Image: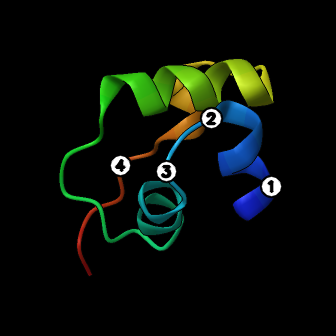
């Protein structure tokens, strides 16, 4: 996570929170940077799963 945050020039804490599913609102800039970094679309980055 630290390497990704460094590579995309974004705050580590934000990347960590997203990875651990602790983020309630996703910053557009972070989503865009992650999509470019992983070469994926937003639908591959985020999925919606119903609560159990």
Q: State how far apart marks 3 and 4 are (Cα).
A: 24 Å
The residue beneath circle 4 is: 48
Would residue 1 be seen by someone viewing this image from the given angle?
no
Q: Which mark is residue 9?
A: 2
The residue beneath circle 3 is: 11
> Is 1 above or below relative to 47?
below
Marks 4 and 1 close (CB-CB < 8 Å)? no
The quarter in which the N terminus is drawn is bottom right
Count all numbered tags in the image, as a single digit: 4
Q: State how far apart marks 1 and 3 are (Cα).
A: 11 Å
Judge depth for marks 3 and 4 and give the one in front: 3
Q: State how far apart marks 4 and 2 are (Cα).
A: 27 Å
Task: Look at the numbered disc 1 and give the secondary structure of its residue.
Answer: helix
Q: Is residue 23 left or right of residue 29?
A: left
Density class for disc 2 (Cα within 10 Å; few <14, some 14-19, many ≥20) is few
Task: Look at the numbered disc 4 and give the secondary structure of its residue.
Answer: loop
Q: Is residue 38 left or right of residue 10?
A: right
Judge depth for marks 4 and 2 and give the one in front: 2
Would residue 48 be seen by someone viewing this image from the given angle?
yes
The residue beneath circle 1 is: 3
Residue 51 x %, y %: 23, 73
- Indicate the quadrant where residue 24 lies: bottom left
């Amino acid at each position: 996570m630290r390497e990704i945050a460094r590579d995309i020039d974004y705050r580590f804490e934000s990347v960590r929170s997203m990875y651990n599913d602790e983020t309630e609102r996703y910053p557009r800039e972070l989503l865009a940077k992650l999509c470019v970094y992983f070469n994926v679309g937003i639908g591959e980055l985020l999925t919606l799963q119903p609560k159990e």
